[in-house]
Image (spheres, grey):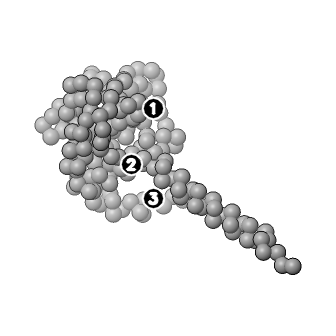
C-alpha cells in the first residue's frame, strides 16, 4: 500500500495553509484611512515627550489660510471612540463639540485618489501600522504620523513622485 500523505506532502500542505492564514490575517491588521460613516465621540489628550513634558508648537503654523498652531500652543492627540484619529483638515477646529459626524466623509471624499493613497501609506508606515518599530513616546509617534499626513495634504504635487518611487524604496536589505 502506498502512502498518500508523506512528509513531503505534509510540508507542502502546511506551507500553503500558513500562507493562506498570513494573507487573510494581514487584511485585518493593515490600517486604512476611511471617513467616519457614523457619529463618533471625539476626545483629546496632550502629547508628551520622553521627559514627560507636554509637546507644543515651536513656531506659528498655518495651512490654506487657517491657523494650525501658534508658538507655545500644546499639541493635542485626537481619539475617535477611544481609537487614534488623525486630522485631514488642518486648521479646522474640532473643539466645537465632542462628536464628529458625516462632515468627515465629505472631507475625505474631497481628497484626490493620490492624496487618499498617500494618507493610507502614512498610516501604514506611521504609528497606526508600525508603532513597534518606531522610537519615542506614543504621543511623539502620533504627532509624527499626523505631520506626515498634513505634509501629504499640503504638498500634493509631491505625491505622484512618492507613489511611483515607493516600490523601489520598499526594498530592504539586511
Are discs 1 and 2 less than 8 Å apart at CB? Answer: no
Q: Give the number of the mark in front: 1 or 2.
A: 2
Q: Is residue 36 above or below residue 158?
A: above
Residue behind mark 3: 170
User: What residue appears at the point 32 percent right and 57 percent down from the top-left corner?
Assistant: 162
Q: Give whichever of discs 1 and 2 has the lower sequence position.
A: 2
Residue behind mark 2: 32
**Extreme residue toward the bottom, this view:** 1
Label 3, label 1: how far apart the Cα atoms are: 24 Å
Q: Is residue 14 above or below residue 129?
A: below
Q: Secondary structure at mark 1?
A: helix
Q: Quadrant of residue 149?
A: top left
Q: Is residue 174 or residue 111 the one in the foreground?
A: 111
Classify residue 110 as left or right of residue 129: left
**Extreme residue toward the front, this view:** 1
Count residues near mark 1 (Cα–Cα under 10 Å), then give few for <14, some for 14-19, many for 20+. some
User: What residue appears at the point 25 percent right and 35 percent down from the top-left corner?
Assistant: 101
Q: Is residue 166 or residue 34 the one in the foreground?
A: 34
Look at the image and tell me whether residue 150 can be seen. no
Residue behind mark 1: 138
Count residues near mark 3 (Cα–Cα under 10 Å), then give few for <14, some for 14-19, many for 20+. few
Amino acid at each position: 500500500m502506498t502512502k498518500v500523505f508523506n512528509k513531503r506532502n505534509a510540508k507542502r500542505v502546511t506551507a500553503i495553509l500558513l500562507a493562506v492564514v498570513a494573507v487573510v490575517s494581514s487584511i485585518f491588521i493593515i490600517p486604512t484611512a476611511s471617513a467616519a460613516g457614523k457619529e463618533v465621540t471625539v476626545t483629546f489628550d496632550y502629547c508628551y515627550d520622553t521627559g514627560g513634558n507636554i509637546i507644543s508648537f515651536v513656531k506659528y503654523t498655518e495651512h490654506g489660510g487657517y491657523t494650525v498652531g501658534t508658538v507655545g500652543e500644546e499639541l493635542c492627540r485626537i481619539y475617535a471612540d477611544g481609537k487614534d484619529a488623525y486630522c485631514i483638515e488642518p486648521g479646522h477646529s474640532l473643539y466645537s463639540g465632542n462628536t464628529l459626524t458625516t462632515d468627515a466623509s465629505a472631507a475625505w471624499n474631497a481628497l484626490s485618489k493620490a492624496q487618499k493613497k498617500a494618507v493610507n501609506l502614512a498610516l501604514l508606515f506611521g504609528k497606526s501600522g508600525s508603532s513597534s518599530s518606531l522610537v519615542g513616546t506614543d504621543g511623539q509617534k502620533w504627532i509624527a504620523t499626523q505631520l506626515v499626513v498634513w505634509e501629504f495634504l499640503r504638498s500634493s504635487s509631491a505625491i505622484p513622485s512618492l507613489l511611483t518611487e515607493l516600490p523601489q524604496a520598499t526594498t530592504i536589505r539586511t
